[in-house]
Image (cartoon, helix red, strand yellow):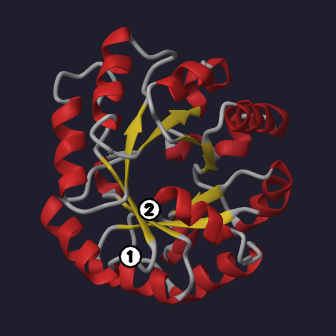
Amino acid sequence: MTGFLASVSSVEEARLVCSLGADVIDLKDPNRGALGALEQDKVRLITALVGKTTTLSATIGDLPACAAELEGAVLGMHASGVDIVKVGVFARSLSPFTLSALDRLTHRNIRIVLVFFAEFSPVEADFEKLKSTGVMGVMLDTCDKASGNLREKMEDEALAQFVNNAKRAGLVTGLAGALTGEDIPPLLRINPDYLGFRGALCRQHERTMQIDSTKVTEIRKLIPENTSISKHRDRLV
């Protein structure tokens, strides 16, 4: 079964989506890019609010995967109390430097999800190699939110290939990228572990605006709740 991931940028939004049944609350600042990092003091407030009732993930910003500050950014966000740290892959492949860094970080019991982007041919990723570094999962997203959503940039067949290949390697999978309610039925057939949303939850469907409770409820209803999702939570926390 597929879970519901909601991206939030404030304590108020986190409280709202938690009360409305989000399976994962993802912390990011949409004003800072595709994976804009939320200020760590806000992250700590949200982790104190949510506790262990819902899985929390957080992005580290739009850092190139080869950036020297990558490890420090991951360590800092992990120290804020989140369950998962999300790292963007803004390239067609990962360098030996990045793979080594991921290995060092996961050996410190940090759960990392890599976020690939439709703009960078993600189906070519070597998931077996990624699994060997200790990475727990992969997501597929879009870098440029204004130029079309995930299903406009990639065919469903390619999305299914990404999900299936990652699952065969034993990785948790997620799909996101300006998704709407209309995208949910076909993506549920692909069966990723999670579908991620931000813009579809916000007023005027604008990702930089505040989350609207009515829209969260609409998306939650379109993703059937199932107790088997708790099995995924057990893998994540």
Q: Give the image location of residue 82, x and y in percent.
A: 31, 61
Query: Residue visible at 72% across and 41% down?
Result: 152
**Left or right: 22 with respect to 60?**
right
Check residue 52 in the rendering and tell me which mark sits there, or answer none.
1
> Type of residue at label 2?
Val
Q: Give the image location of residue 39, x and y in percent.
A: 17, 59
Which of the 4 quarters of the picture holds residue 154? top right
Quarter the N terminus occupies: bottom right
**Left or right: 47 with respect to 4?**
left
Crowd rating for badge 2 (residues with CA inside 10 Å; few <14, some 14–19, many 20+): few
> Type of residue at label 1?
Lys
Q: Are marks 2 and 1 in contact (CB under 8 Å)?
A: yes
| Residue matched to label 2 | 237
Mark 1 lies on a secondary structure that is: loop
Which of the 4 quarters of the picture holds residue 46? bottom left
Which of the 4 quarters of the picture holds residue 195? bottom right
* Disc 2 to disc 1, C-alpha distance: 8 Å
Quarter the C terminus occupies: bottom left
Asked if residue 176 is positioned above or below residue 199 in the image, the reply reads above
